[in-house]
Image (spheres, rainbow, N blue to C red):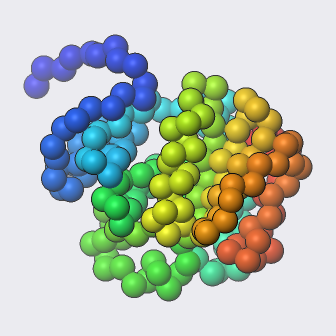
Amino acid sequence: MNTALLNLPSPLQLSIDLTDEQFWQLCQRNRDYRFERNQDGDLIVMSPTGSDTGRRNIKITTQLEIWNSRHKLGIAFDSSTGFKLPNGAERSPDASWLKKERWDALTTEQQEKFAPICPDFVVELRSKSDSLKPLQDKMREYVDNGTKLGWLIDRQNQQVEIYRMNQQIEVIKSPPTLSGEDILSDFVLDLAEIL
């Protein structure tokens, strides 16, 4: 097999027609990249995060998993997890959580691939190379597809945008913590080493 190295802008959006299975196989064969598809089926290719963003992101997923292990109310996911949203988009939030009964309602096959479900809770962490508007659009897409609570952590502007179902976006400047509200009862994310 011949390989070719491409020097392309990231994220790159391509209009390409892939079945769900072909998209799954593409992701499995190219694990050094993150792929998403928007609701129109356009392929979005993203490079892995930089080390500093990865360091901050693991602090989010670790805190979420520790809370989840204690409360056992659902399933926590890291940034490499893909979900097929009701609008047809395939997205991979930086951290996410799903109520246990919703996860358990999926078949084993659905759980093993990109689960056809929208998480109840999502987090996106803006890295220095991320443009803000595409992340805001992605957050709105999550909420439009069923996410009840979402946090867009914007390190560049030292703020957090909070997305809630059927509510206006709330913007908080430099919060020390974030509350999981009634979605993730008693969960508090410490932002000391994240924001």
Residue 140: x and y, percent? Answer: 53, 54
85 shown above or below 33: below
Q: Is residue 137 visible?
A: yes
Q: Residue furthest right?
A: 176
Q: In which quadrant will I find the N terminus?
A: top left
Q: How many marks?
A: 0
Residue 42: x and y, percent? Answer: 28, 41
125 shown above or below 119: above
Residue 25: x and y, percent? Answer: 21, 48
**Residue under the image location 40 percent in, 39 percent down:** 34
Which residue occupies the foreground of this view, 185 or 28? Answer: 185
Which residue occupies the foreground of this view, 135 or 122? Answer: 135
Q: In which quadrant will I find the C terminus?
A: top right
Report the side of 65 relative to 101 (left or right): right
Q: Is residue 57 visible?
A: no
Report the side of 192 relative to 51 (left or right): right
Q: Quadrant of residue 51?
A: top right
126 shown above or below 25: above
Which residue occupies the foreground of this view, 3 or 172? Answer: 172
**Residue under the image location 48 percent in, 55 percent down:** 141
Report the side of 15 relative to 52 (left or right): left
Residue 70: x and y, percent? Answer: 72, 76
Q: Quadrant of residue 154?
A: top right
Which residue occupies the foreground of this view, 170 or 68? Answer: 170
Q: Residue furthest left?
A: 1
**Residue under the image location 29 percent in, 16 percent down:** 6
**Residue under the image location 21 percent in, 56 percent down:** 20
